[in-house]
Amino acid sequence: MSANDAPAFGVDSEVGRLRSVMLHRPGGELRRLTPRNNGALLFDGIPWVERAQAEHDRFAGTLLEHGVEVLYVGALLAECLELPEAREAVSVSVTADPRLGQTLGRELAAYLADLEPERLAAVLVEGLTKEEFGTSGSLRHKMMRPTEFVIDPLPNMMFTRDSSVWIGDAVAVTSLAMPARRRETTLTGLIYHHHPRFAAVPKLYDPSLEHLEGGDVLALAPGVLAVGVGERTTPAGAERLARKAFEHGRIHTVLVVPIAQRRATMHLDTVCTMVDRDRMVMYAPAEQRLEAYTLTSADGGASLSIKGPKRFLDAAADAIGVDRIEIIHTGERDVVTAEREQWDDGNNTLALAPGIAVAYERNTVTNARLERAGIKVLTIPGSELGSGRGGPRCMSCPSARDAFADA
C-alpha cells in the first residue's frame, strides 16, 4: 500500500462522506477473556468469538458496499513490522514492562525478534501466556501460573476510535486512561509513525500526555470540536488538545463538555453523535443536562479564552453557525427504553454521509425514530460486539472524509 493510494481529504466533520476508515477485526484476544478477567479487561461478558467476528465482517461489508476503503489494523501493523526500526521500537516498548523484570524482559525481546511480521502483529494484540512463551531462567517466569500473561491481550483493540482521532489533515494518537488499554496506543502510534501511508501526517498528540480518548472527540463542523470530559478524558487533556489544535491552525473553537464519570457514559459518543449537518441523535436526559465551556484562541493556542458553561446544544449551534441543532432522542419520554438503548449504544452511530448512518439493529426504538426523521439507517448485528460497550462509531477511526462543504 503506498501513500499515493490515500483519499485526498482528512477529517473535518462527523458527516462528510466517509472515504477511508481503520478497523480491527476481533480475533484471538477475545478468546483470552474469562469470568475471572473480563471485568479488568473492560468487558461486561464473555463474547462468542466466531459470532463477534461474523458481526464485525458484516460491519466492514456494509462500509465496503458504500464505497468506503477499509484498512485493517492487523495488516497495517504487519506491514510496519517489516521495518527493523519499527520492530525495535515495539520490542523496547513491550519489554520495558517493569512486571517482567530484567531477565524475562531480555528473553522476551529475543523471542519477539524471531517472529515473522504477521505472527508478531498477532502476538502484540492477542497477548502471550507463560505456557506459550516456553522456558525461562527468570524468577518472575518461574513464579507465574501457566495461563498468566507475559504480554497482556488487547480485547478492546476493535474500538479503534479511542486510540487515535483525525483533526483536519493531522492525527492525534491519544492517551488512554484505563490500564488495560494503554498499550493500544503503542501499536496505533507505530502505524502512524512508520507506515508509508501515514508517516508524513502531522501528529497533534502523544500517549505520554494527559488522558484523552478519541471517543470523547466529535468534529461538529469544520473548525469546531466537542470534547467530552468524564471517565476517560481529563480537563487537562481537553485543554492540551485545544492548544495543539489551535496551533495547527485548523480549529477555531473547542467545546469542552462535562459528562457523568461512569461506565454507561464513558465517552461523549455514548451520549450523542452527529447524523447530519445539524442533526444529532442523543440520549434524551442529556439534552438539558449537558453544558459546555467554549475555548477559543486569538494567538494560535498561546493563550486561551474560556467562556461558559452554557447549554451544550446552544454553544454548539453558535459555534457551527446554525439557529439550532435538531435532536433525535433515544426513547424520549420513555425513561426505561432510553436507558436500555443508550446502554446498548443506540447513540453511537457512524455517519457515512449526511443523513446516512450505521447503527446496531438491536436499538429498534432509536432506529425507528431516526428513520422517521429522514435518516437512512444501515443496521448491523451487535449482540456479541456490544459486550465491550461500543457501537459502530467506537469500532471505526475515519482517516478520510469528503470536506464538509462538499458533503
Image: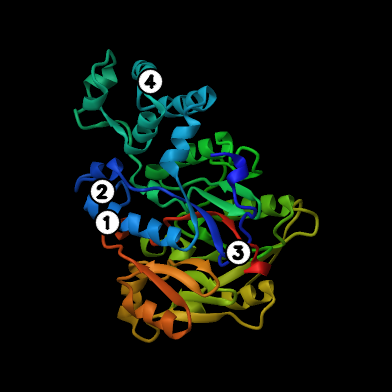
Q: 10 Å neighbourhood of mark 1: few (<14), some, or many (≥20)?
A: some
Q: 10 Å neighbourhood of mark 2: few (<14), some, or many (≥20)?
A: some
Q: 10 Å neighbourhood of mark 4: few (<14), some, or many (≥20)?
A: many
Q: Amino acid at mark 3?
A: Ser
Residue located beneath label 4 in the image: 105
Measured as percent of width and height from the top left, residue 321 is found at 69, 76
Is the Cβ of the residue at disc 1 closer than 8 Å to that at disc 2? yes
Measured as percent of width and height from the top left, residue 264 is found at 37, 64
Is the Cβ of the residue at disc 4 closer than 8 Å to that at disc 3? no
Measured as percent of width and height from the top left, residue 117 is found at 41, 28
Q: Distance from label 2 to label 3 (Cα)?
A: 34 Å
At 59% from the left and 45% from the top, the residue drawn is 5
Q: Amino acid at mark 2?
A: Asn
Q: Distance from label 4 to label 1 (Cα)?
A: 32 Å
Residue located beneath label 3 in the image: 13
- Answer left or right for 107 relative to 63: left
Q: Distance from label 1 to label 2 (Cα)?
A: 7 Å
* Viewer-nearest of discs 2 and 3: 3
The first of marks 2 and 4 along the sequence is 2
In the image, residue 106 sits, relative to residue 342, either above or below, namely above
In the image, residue 121 sits, relative to residue 290, either above or below, namely above
Q: Which SS class for mark 3?
A: loop
The answer to whether residue 183 is seen in the rendering is no
Q: Which SS class for mark 2?
A: loop
Residue located beneath label 2 in the image: 38
Is the Cβ of the residue at disc 3 closer than 8 Å to that at disc 1? no
